[in-house]
Image (cartoon, rainbow, N blue to C red):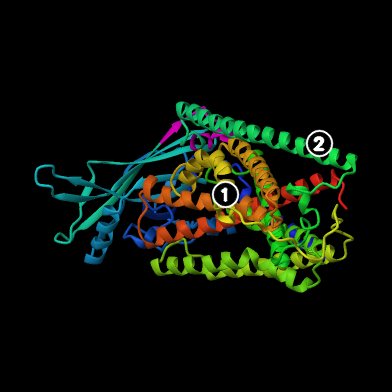
Amino acid sequence: MAHFKAIQVALLLLLGASLSCEAKSHTVGEDIQLFANKVGPFKNPTETYRFFSLPFCAPKDGPKDKLEDLGEVLEGDRLVSTPYKIKFRTNVSNVELCSKSLTASDIDALLEAVKADYYFQMYFDDLPVWGFIGKVEKNIKTGVRKYYLFTHFHFEISFNDDKVIEINVSSDPDKTEEISLENLKTVSFSYSVNWLPTRITYEHRMDRYAKYSFLPQHMEIHWFSIINSCVTVLLLTGFLATILLRVLKNDFLKYTRDDEMGQEQEETGWKYLHGDVFRFPKNTNLLAAMIGAGVQMLSIALLVFGMALVGMFYPYNRGALLAALIVIYALTASIASYVAGIYYKKFGGTDWVNNVLLTSCLFCAPTLGVFAYLNTVAIFYRSTAALPFGTICIIVLLWALVTFPLTVVGGIAAKNSKAEFNAPCRTTKLPRDIPPLPWYRTTFMQMLMAGFLPFSAIYIELYYIFASIWGHKVYTIYSILFIVFIILIIVTSFITIALTYFQLAVEDHRWWWRSFLCGGSTGLFIYGYCFYYYFIRSEMTGLMQTSFFFGYNAVVCYAFFLMLGSVGFISSLTFVRHIYRAIKCE
């Protein structure tokens, strides 16, 4: 146990390094390094390349990589040194950076970059700054396009006392060079730096990035849309709850009256199934593993929301969220195996090794398959999105030394527990025949009905989330997202309970798997929204961007399927136990 505690402490320290933001003080004239990060087409935010994959001015002794943590590497950041000489509170004007003789291959690379609207990203004192590498001008009369490369950049930097507060970069429209394969030339690059005082404090220097995506009028519209959506969903849920409670009350009164009269009444409705409703389904090992994995996903979501609400994920804290997800997933592995083991034991399972292995691989294996394909595509494109071999080894060791051992520990704890199912009604030896059901009561149609209402509660927020993850906007209003998440959980729980009752009312006792599938069906709706966003709301193109978008979204939607499926199953199981405990069963 001491070994596991030591590993957990090390992981938490690793996470803390990704989340830390230490204030830096500078003296007048002190050199401050400007790091170049990456370049890429503006429409494809995941398709990024190393800054010096294009023929820019490099340091005389060559670019040197900045040491990065796990989160930064996962984010695709590859910071390198640049030849820019920027001194604290020292203005410079028209400083020549270098002169480069462009070859045909250099011109071809720059042409493709300007045509694709490439942008660059740099970091100065841990502050991000962006700019475009060139522009396209089209002659309206002739329709001829000309491509220009920006050769001069002006950095405007704000300071407060001894700290850097803000940085902006702009290009000089009068200092451009036309690039074409017919005209090979030598290009001179230059830059200027202007320092300005500001009253903004260091503690609030990241606020401008938080306000970037949501102007005041947009924020009001956002709040109104969310409130309108939530109120509509809650009203529909309340209406359905009222009907369900009234029907249940009438059922209880009818069954109680029949029991008091002592007359032989033909049992109908859900009471008729008291000898079959707790008959365990097929593939209990898989069902238990999926419930355990889903509970782990719910735990991860709640922990990440807790960290976000206390301000640990400030804008452009490079890779902090990804590092947090990986570390928290590793540390919560025992939750998945313990919950899976408890349910597996209640279901009467005895193959514990198989249960632990299935639980450990249920989410990891599909994710590994998707990652292997996407990383191969990124390597083929020579993109910074491709993880280095060393980082892959670290993640594998993290799984082998932390995730899997904790999974085994959770499974052992579940095996040694005294958990029992304790069904309120005895199960008969032979199952009852299920009457023919109409088409709208099939599993697929029930999943469509179950997923629509929860999805309608979150679809507005999905656009902002997608625009942040798969665009260049910033998402910081975690309070709204947390409210929407809680509503999603509540609505999923209730709609699954309602559909389980309607299923039992028509004398169909196969509710175990259906409650899980109906609860998780919202994940399928979210993946359907991915197609709408990609083809209608975005301008993303290309094999790499398409693969990353649909590949990683499939992993996220799978996690939602497991999480919401577990919520639906546990809610339905609690409901079924309650209603059958309230009646007399022989």
Q: Position of residue 495 (x, y in %)?
A: 64, 43
| Furthest residue in direction front, as rendered | 264
Give residue 257's quadrant in the image: top right
Q: Position of residue 451 (x, y in %)?
A: 57, 47
Q: Secondary structure at mark 1?
A: helix
Q: Residue at x 79, y 44 (%)?
A: 579
Q: Nearer the viewer, residue 32 or 259?
A: 259
Above or below — where is 400 with respect to 332?
A: below
Q: Find residue 522 and name its label.
A: 1
Disc 2 target residue: 253
Q: Nearer the viewer, residue 355 or 273?
A: 273
Specify start and end residues of the magenta stretch as a single range: 195-209
Q: Is residue 551 left or right of residue 136?
A: right
Q: Amino acid at mark 2?
A: Leu
Q: Is residue 268 left or right of residue 482?
A: right
On the question of residue 32 being in view, the answer is yes
